[in-house]
Image (tube, rainbow, N blue to C red):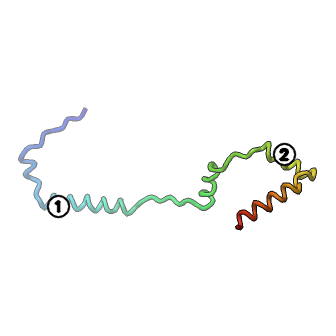
Amino acid sequence: MPQINPVSTSSAAAISPRSLAATSAQVASRSTASTDRSDRVEVSAAARLLSRLGDLPEVREDLVARVRGEIEDGSYDTDDKIDAAINSLLEDVV
């Protein structure tokens, strides 16, 4: 383990206020320079859209398959369903 030597009063006296101010200015300029260089992340519209995929509800595959079958065999569009859809649309408009 490295040893740390004590600071003597003679070595502390060797540091002048002028050299201390110069050192502070160097540190400040390095600090400013490092803040000027910053990293940025740009997220595309496609990435934002993809990130929302987890918010979508789960697809009810059984319901989708049933409705597809009804559409294919012509039994999906009944008069009752059309009337219900029209009434729902009218309620939304009014």
Q: Nearer the viewer, residue 41 or 70?
A: 70
For image coordinates 26% across by 60% down, the residue present is 28
Residue at disc 1, secondary structure: helix
Q: Is residue 67 left or right of residue 88?
A: right
Q: Is residue 36 above or below residue 14?
A: below
Residue lying at 75% horizontally and 65% vertically, measured from the top left: 90
Q: Residue at x 61, y 53 (%)?
A: 52
> How far separated are the C-alphas under marks 1 and 2?
80 Å
Q: Residue at x 80, y 47 (%)?
A: 64
- 45 lies left or right of 31: right
Residue 44 or 36: which is nearer the viewer?
44
Q: Is residue 54 left or right of residue 22?
A: right
| Residue 70 picture location, percent across and down | 88, 49
**Is residue 44 found left or right of 5 in the rendered image?**
right
Q: Amino acid at mark 1?
A: Ala
Q: Amino acid at mark 2?
A: Arg
> Residue extending furthest right?
73
Residue that lies at the very extreme toward the bottom in this rendered image: 94
**Which residue is denoted by mark 2 in the rendering?**
66
Q: Quadrant of the C terminus?
A: bottom right
Local crowd at mark 2 within 10 Å, few (<14), some, or many (≥20)?
few
Q: Quadrant of residue 26?
A: bottom left
The answer to which of marks 1 and 2 sits earlier in the sequence is: 1
What is the crowding at mark 1: few (fewer than 14 residues within 10 Å), some, or many (at least 20)? few
Q: Percent x, y for residue 16?
A: 10, 57
Residue 10 placed where, x, y %?
Answer: 6, 47
Locate the N terminus and report the quarter of the image it occupies. top left
Q: Name the residue that disc number 1 marks.
A: 21
Report helix, strand or loop for mark 2: helix
